[in-house]
Amino acid sequence: MLYKYIVSNLFFFLSCFLFAQENFIIRGKITNNDAKPISFATIQLINTDTKKVISFSISDSQGNYSIKVNNQGNYILEISHVKYSKISETLQVNESYTTKDIILESKEKEIEEVVIISKAITAKEDTISYNLNSFTNGHEEKLKDILNKLPGIEVENGNIKVNGKQVDKLLVDGKDFFGNNHKIATENLNAQMIKSVEILNNYKSSQIAKNIEGGNQTALNVGIKKEYKNKITGEASLLSAYENKYNAQLNLFKFTNNLSVSFIGNANNTGQVSFTIDDYLKLNSDVRNDLMNSELSSFKEMDNFLPNFLLSDNNVIKKENQMGSINLSYLPSEKIKITGFTLLNNTWQREKILSERTFLNSNFHSIDNNHSKGNFLFNQTHVKIDFEINKNNSLNYSVSIEPTKDHTDREISQESYEKILFNENMKNRNMKFGQQISYLSKIAKNKLITFNIYQESKSSKGDFFLLSSHSLYDFNINNLVQNSTKKDREWGVIGKYSQNIGEIVVRNSMGYLWKQNFFKNSIIENNIRNHISFHTDYSFIKPAILKNKNFLQFLLDFELRNYNLKLNTHSSNSLFFLPQAKIKLEFKQTHTLALFYKREVDYISADKLNSYEILLNYSSIYKESFIKERKEIINNTIGLEYLFLNLFDGNFLSANVNYSRKANFPITNSSVNSQYTILNYISSSNQDIWNTFINFEKKLKFIKYKLKINVNYNFIKSSTFTNFQEIPMNTNRVNGDVSFQTYNKKSIVNYDFGSKFSYLNTDYKNQDISLKNSQIIPFVNLYFNFGESLKFSLKNSYEFYKSGSISRDKYNLGLKVIYRKEHTPWKFWIEGYDILNISGSEIVETSTDDNILQKEIYHKLPGYAGIGISYSL
């Protein structure tokens, strides 16, 4: 009902706006891409019904024109010039004066000559700009389609990566756009709106701080074309498909110099989600990431809670998703900037999984049929206010609130020695609130002081109801209820002094952080209770020296951190030295080599220090933790980064190799008791991780081809424990893709072909067990362009899955035919996705979890085929 109310009111206000005036003069200015006026351009006004010329005019020496019409209505405004491509636009005339500025493009022949002799990419200071004409073929629909064709940039599951690493900031016309949720931008901004794409290296949101210290972030800025500014633009679309599948979308944008407002809404059951796991983790990040000009470490233990709908991907039999979001950027004056967004998402899904489970070091074997349904409601509202007091002082405040609800109901039929039925009902309610204030003051030409204060609180409440046809665990009852509460409170005060001495920057940070972690858990029927309070307060001092200009650049950072620990009533102290170093050779801005090292520390959360039982699921229970001491988690990382980008043709090579060793992080020991698993937290010795990423792109412009290769290699050396015996474990993972792409705008057909691949191998050294999963997906995609009115794409892929001795394969066929009626805002299309598997399909995976070898068959979301219609504003 709310959705219908918003849409109906939107059209009401639009109609009131459109029919308010009665005199009819059309005027404007005609310019080229360099904003230079075009004289002697011919302007014709054409009746949309009769196609007859109603009136005409010629632009003057300043590019200005004026044309009269007697009646209001819809017309075609056609502008032509001997040196520029003709342009036609639909124009609705219902006001006494209608202003329509026009930008003409040089004719195609001239554009191609310019591209041949000019740079495909330009670099100026810290900004790398792409000539989009050099990399696109005109078949792009959304922002992600453009970004995936630019060297060094890729969109993976909606997230934007530059040189293999996620960008720190996504900006639209230099303004924040939906925080860290890249997927909203990449999948909702239409390609025809995009004017430019820029990578901003050494980015820092505070210009005062950047002028003295330089920046250490990477941002991606998307420019919007002039014709989409200073008015409401957007698109409303609806797809209706076989078996009651649907996808409804409403996007509305208004971009002006002082105000930018965006609304994006979607409702579908085709499997489209509003954000990914990476998006959720970034949206769920701490408020300390908003601190201005702060060097506070972000290393922390991973949160156990992740919504099930993010983990299941589309390995479900049914999924429904509704999302509504608003983004705002407002400049009420030259000194104040207000930015913010709110996002509300609701997801409902059903899963069906057949799992064959074998317990290591045990004869117990079971086949479990899992049927589940769940609902996840997520909201986040974030507001940031920047106040530039004067040219030397600025103030920043931000606040964020994030409530979530997760409810899952699962029925399990387990067949082992006997058949046992289980029913699980899980409810989780989370609330997160954070705020921060930052003050920056330039006390001299080369000196800066920064003060930060922040506060954050998180609370999580969970209820777990478990019912069985058999006695549960060793409680001798067949139903259990568990309540749990987890709270985190944190606030901190930080001060920083920075001074620029020529090309060298020296700085020193110091501060104090108060952190409390609280966990309470009770199993009601057995009066079992855990009550743990863990304080990890610390003070720190962090001097540093850096140089981020010219050929040799470096960073030397030395943090001394003193912890005051308190576990329930026991207190202690710990002191840590945490160095960080980076050396970078910048042969050119687009040709660099860097070596880095970093040491980080954190402490485990209170829930891993339990003294009594904690229910995990129908087949696993945590018993007393064997982590009795307040052990720190230590992480050391060393790495090498290389980048080469040819500005003239876009040839690109990026490589990133890093090694990290993590010590004392919590893992589980498992043992089998009858028909369930007993888990105990213990501290690991070491975990060694190698990561290698290589991205190579070669543009063969004479045959209009691009070769693209992405390869990721990951090696993990760790251990697992069974019956308190250590089992060394090595995991090798390789994944990537190889593709050839064409980008000839003059050709009727463009295509890309190649293959995606992944391979996972886990070896247990003291066991005769090796776990192998592989996936190969060769693909061929064809894109036909029959002009602006008709486009057709055909996507083919063959997916082959193999897990141990089990394999599955399927042919995925998708197509889309788009018809856009000339000079009108209407678009019609036929769309099909995985149309040969409309009844559904299966994939198979082998995995280990808590020393249980699992072979799982997932039912995937069925494909669809339908028709769509859209209207563009």
Image (cartoon, grey):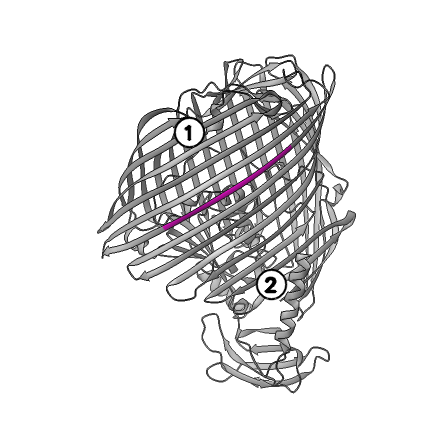
Can you tell which quarter of the image residue 377 is in? top right
Residue at 53% x, 44% y: name it.
279
* In the rendered image, the vertical position of residue 129 relative to residue 348, given as above or below: below
Q: Which disc, if any, is residue 393?
A: none
672 is higher (above) or lower (below) than 63? above
C-alpha separation, residue under disc 1 versus residue under disc 2? 50 Å
* Whether residue 91 can be seen here: no
The picture places residue 54, in percent across and down from the top left corner, at: 66, 85
Q: Where's residue 627, x and y in %?
A: 45, 20
Q: Residue at x 32, y 44 (%)?
A: 494
Q: Helix, strand, or loop for circle 2? A: strand
Mark 1 in CB contact with mark 2 (< 8 angstroms):
no
Q: Which amino acid, by three-letter code, is at mark 2?
A: Gly
* Residue 496 part of the magenta-drawn span: no
Q: Is residue 343 left or right of residue 164?
A: right
Q: Quadrant of the N terminus?
A: bottom right
Pair 1/2: label in front: 1
Closer-to-camera residue (156/140): 156
Q: Residues within 10 Å of mark 1 (few under 14, many from 20)?
A: many
Report whether residue 129 is seen: yes
Which secondary structure type mostly characterizes the magenta part of the structure? Answer: strand
Instruction: State the extent of the magenta-drawn residues as a range.
Output: 426-437
Return the mark for residue 534: 1
What residue lies at 57% left-to-right and 57% top-to-bottom? 189
Residue at image mark 2: 234
Q: Earlier in the sequence, mark 1 or mark 2?
A: 2
